Structure formats: structure tokens, C-alpha cells
Image (cartoon, rainbow, N blue to C red):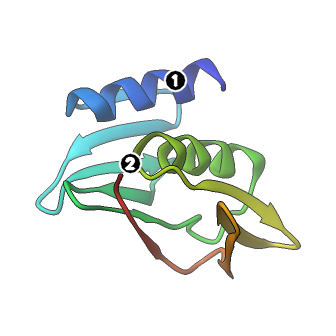
Amino acid sequence: MRQITSNMIAALRDGRAWKEKATSTHRGERGMLVRLHADLIAVVTADTVELCAAGWPTATTCDRLDAIAREFTGWTVGRYRGDIVCRKDTTKITYPADAWITLPRE
């Protein structure tokens, strides 16, 4: 895991605002929000984690989404042919890079 990604996870766990280079976290009405550049890529609430690559299925975006998913849901996130792929055990969900997916928290 990249250092920036590790710092982002620590900020989310602590529920605090944080910014390093192009990644930031802050508290919003729906929960903790994660932005990459200007795009909202995740919302972490008490019960769910909402993820979206915001149309940018890059290695950096997927690294951030994967770290959030692993930490709070036990799912993994990757990419395949421009789509985002979430996996847990034998379940696999593929969705477009500009769509949101909601995963339950563990």
C-alpha cells in the first residue's frame, strides 16, 4: 500500500480531515468523504461504504478504492477493461467506472 493511501486510511479510521497531494478526506453530512483531485470517490458511513472511480479507473484511483474497501468491508477492488471489479470470497461485482456501488461494512 502506498504511503499516501495508508495515511488516508488512518484519517478515515480517526474520522478526521486530512489532505496530501491530490487525496483528501473530510466529514460530510453522509459520513467521511474521500476525494481524489476534485472528484468524490468514496463515502464511508457507519453502515456502508460507497465507491466510485468517478470515470477514472486508473491505478491510483483503484489503489485508494481497494484500500478503503479492504479496511472497512473486507472486499477487494481492481479494474478490468475500464470497469471496476469488486470481489469478496466467491462473489464478483463488475460496474462501470462512472457508477457508484454500495458495500456493507463489516
The residue at the far left in this view is: 29
Q: Position of residue 70 (x, y in %)?
A: 53, 44
- The answer to which image quadrant residue 81 occupies is bottom right
**Is residue 93 found left or right of 34 in the rendered image?**
right
Q: List the residue tagged with mark 2.
A: 34
Residue 76 higher or lower than 98, as above or below: above
- Name the residue rendered at 55%, 30% in the picture: 5
- The answer to which image quadrant residue 49 occupies is bottom left
Query: Toward the viewer: 76 or 30?
Result: 76
- Name the residue rendered at 48%, 45% in the picture: 68
Q: Is mark 1 on a helix, strand or loop?
A: helix
Query: Toward the viewer: 38 or 59?
Result: 59
Earlier sequence position, callout 1 versus callout 2: 1
Q: Where is residue 91 in the image (x, y as percent from the top left)?
A: 66, 72
Q: Which amino acid does label 2 sit on?
A: Val
The residue at the far front in this view is: 90
- Name the residue rendered at 23%, 56% in the picture: 45
Q: Is mark 2 on a helix, strand or loop?
A: strand
Name the mark on residue 6.
Answer: 1
Please rate how many residues cluster around mark 1, counting C-alpha atoms within 10 Å: few if below 14, some from 14 to 19, many from 20: few
Q: What residue type is labelled 1?
A: Ser
